[in-house]
Image: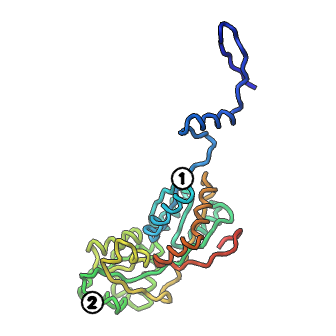
Amino acid sequence: MRFSLVSLRAKVYIVPMPPLRFLSALLMFVLPGFVPAHAPSRQITVAAAADLTFVFKDVAPRFEKDTGISVNLSFGSSGNFFSQIQNGAPYDLFFSADVRYPRELESAGLTEPGTLHSYARGKIVLWTPKASGLDVNRGLNVLLDPGVHKVAIANPEHAPYGRAAVAALQHDGLYDRVRDKLVLGENISQTAEFVLSGSADAGVVALSLALSPTMKDRGKYFEIPESDYPAIDQAAVILKSSPNKDAARRFLEFLRKPETAELMRRYGFAVPEAKAAGGTS
């Protein structure tokens, strides 16, 4: 036990120093802003596929209110996040638009065992601005119209929605006929922005974005049959390097709540039925 010297009226008393744990508790009571070095963080950093932009901006405040844990969101292409995580990017959670990326990270030992969670299946639509005059009910064939000069899709090299768009165009025998019209977005959000800004006449975007407040009143969309492209199975995983695994688990659990699942459905995602606690889904 450590001791300190306290002078009082010329007499010297030896006073036992309180244990560190007691000091921490005392300081937290006296100084509300004091946080011990060993205390867990009340924030998580989430790398999320761009199709989750609007729904997660709705989910995160609800989670923060429910738990007191703040959420720092980063949106982008799943492939780019995959590369960043392989190179040590400091995320707690990774929400991918392609289940293959979390599975590869799991195989490489970069994820917390048993946390892989299939949270949704995405869908693609053909979207055009209202002012375009294009009849989207004709489906992808409308892209052959002479008035369509640029068609936006996400870059298929690292964006699952881009690969789905290419597959749908190939399914309808249109890819080679419209290839020269294609402009590639870095992710599905940038792809949508190309069409919103007029840089493209039409675009193949995520249904979740077409239903977002930014787009739903500014254009028309045609939902491309899911049989025309490989399933966009999406999954999340907690990273092994995360210092906030307990908080990250709480976020995954929050997504399984019926009200959160219903919110995901309103944004156009197909959400799997909840499974019994204790296993991955």
Q: Residue at x 30, y 73 (%)?
A: 196
Identity, as a three-letter code, of the amino acid under mark 1: Gln
Label 2, on which residue?
145
Identity, as a three-letter code, of the amino acid under mark 2: Asp
Whether pointer 1 and pointer 2 mark residues with C-beta atoms closer than 8 Å, the reply is no
Quadrant assignment for the N terminus: top right
Instruction: Estimate the x, y position of residue 250 in percent, counting from the top left.
Output: 61, 61
Q: In terms of depth relative to the viewer, which is nearer, 10 or 20?
A: 10
Q: Residue at x 52, y 56 (%)?
A: 45
Mark-to-mark CA distance, 1 and 2: 50 Å
Instruction: Estimate the x, y position of residue 135 in percent, counting from the top left.
Output: 30, 90
Residue 221 sits in quarter: bottom left
Residue 209 sits in quarter: bottom left
Q: In terms of depth relative to the viewer, which is nearer, 84 or 50?
A: 50
Residue sitting farthest toward the right: 1
Instruction: Estimate the x, y position of residue 23 in percent, counting from the top left.
Output: 66, 33
Label 1, on which residue?
43
In this rendering, position of residue 265 left or right of residue 36: left
Q: Residue at x 37, y 88 (%)?
A: 140
In this rendering, position of residue 153 left or right of residue 39: left
User: SS at mark 2?
Assistant: loop
Mark earlier in primary sequence (1, 2): 1
